Structures are given as structure tokens and as C-alpha cells.
Amino acid sequence: MIMLHVMLEMLLWPICVAMMLMFSHVFRFVSVLGMAMKLQSLTHCFPAQGQKCVFHFLAYNSIKKHDPLCMNNLGVCYAMGYGVGQCPRRAFLWYKQAAQRLCAQSMHSLGGCYYNGFGTNVNYEAAFNAFLQAVRYGSVKSACFLGLMYSRGEFVTKSERRAYLWYRYGALRGDCNAQYDYSICLRLGEGCNSAKAEADKWLAIAAENGSGEAKAAIDRIPEIAATGTVASRRSQTAMAL
């Protein structure tokens, strides 16, 4: 039975690679939708083999075609260990190359690397600049982390008002994490006047859009009001994988 499985993998491997090269334009489009969708579809029957197929396809397009989307997702492979051994340093370097080619997703991930010391040294200045550049090129979720850095005074001068404005920027553009932090600012009056009815509205919106923190918070609103500032509750993980 084991030998049969190995033989099937050996037969399927070149077929998968050939199909990817034949329909590369389709796979490039799918890459925009995210690494998780590709892995889920390609690894339904043969998880390890499917991940290797994705990895080699992305490596080919990154090296030969200098495709920034593929570079970004190759960084995801190294960051998560999809189809290759996990390597934070290589993930960081691929994010950096894609960011230099103006991939907003990679700019955000690069900021996460600098912020968390993932594959490089912690560098709040570089993280802030990467997040700011990502926002300029359309990464809404980076606004939330700019707000986080202002709320904590990391590299920048601590400012509840600027943190509030960045959370509001992200919230109005649909980022559920920013919506959650915006609701907390409104509830506690951090950087703005307290507005509990408006805070409840944004908390519900954040929960509806997928914020796990918001969903958990809805059942404990009285407790949240007494727990401290947004900065003490926000996750430090800025990586966008």
C-alpha cells in the first residue's frame, strides 16, 4: 500500500508541474486571491505533493519572470513551511524583493518582519516606514498597525489622537481589526470624545467582518471598559500571511 502511494506521487508530480506551466496565467490570477486558497485546492488529495507543486511554480515565476505576486507568496511558503522547510530569513528576503517591486501585500509583511524580528532584527523605524508605504500603495490593514505603533510610542512619539485617526482610516475602509480598535477608542475616549453608542455599532461591524477579538468582546462590553487601553489588548503580530 505504501509503495502504491509512493508510485502515485511520483506519477502525479510531473503531471502537476506540467499543468501549472501550461496554465500559468490562471495560476497567476489565483495567486492574487491568496496562498491559502491555492494550497487548499491543490492539496486536497495529496497535501505534501500539492504544496511542493505550488512552491516550485512560485519559485519559477519569481526567479524567471520576477513576478512580485509570486515573490510575495514564495515568502509565505518560507514563512509557513509550505512545500519547503520553514525559513524566516528567506521569507523576509522574498518579501523585501516583492516590496521593492511595489507589492503592497509584501510591504505589509515586510513591516511585520521588522516589527516582530522575523527573519531580521527588530527595527521599529523600518517597520513604521514599511507600513506607511503599504498604506500608500493600498494595504488597508497596515493602517491598523500604524495606529498600534502610535498608541505604544514605538519609533514615533506616542499619540492617542494619531492612533485613533489611523484606526478610523482602516475602519472606514473595511479592515475588521481596525474597526475593533476604533470601537475601543470610541468607548474609552482615547484620542476622541467617548461615544458608546457609536462604539457598539463599530464593534458589531468588526465582529460581522470577522474580527475574533470583536466577537469575544461583544459578550463582555462592561469588562472591556475597565481593562485599560487599546495598546494593552492589541496583538503584537503584524505578519500578513
Image (cartoon, rainbow, N blue to C red):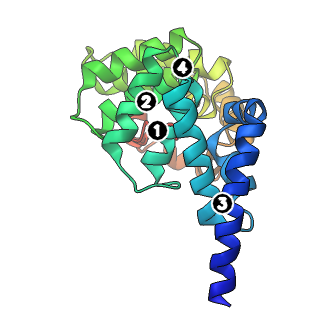
Cα gap from disc 2 to disc 4, whole angstroms: 10 Å
Using the image, tell me which numbered label, if any, was put on residue 95: 2
Near-viewer residue (180 or 18):
18
Cα gap from disc 1 to disc 2, whole angstroms: 6 Å
State whether residue 69 appears in this view: yes
Q: Check disc 4 and report the residue beneath it.
A: 104
Q: Residue at x 75, y 29 (%)?
A: 25
Outermost residue toward the bottom in this view: 1
Using the image, tell me which numbered label, if any, was put on residue 13: 3
Camera-nearest label, 2 or 4: 2
**Amino acid, disc 1:** Gly
Residues tagged 3 and 2 counted as in contact (Cβ below 8 A):
no
Q: Is residue 216 above or below residue 157?
A: below
Disc 3 on helix, strand or loop? Answer: helix
* Location of residue 13 (image quadrant): bottom right
Disc 2 on helix, strand or loop? Answer: helix
Tell me the crowding category of disc 3: few under 14, some 14 to 19, or many 20 or more residues within 10 angstroms, Cα based.
some
Cα gap from disc 4 to disc 3, whole angstroms: 32 Å
**Amino acid, disc 4:** Ala
Residues tagged 4 and 3 counted as in contact (Cβ below 8 A):
no
Q: Residue at x 70, y 31 (%)?
A: 28
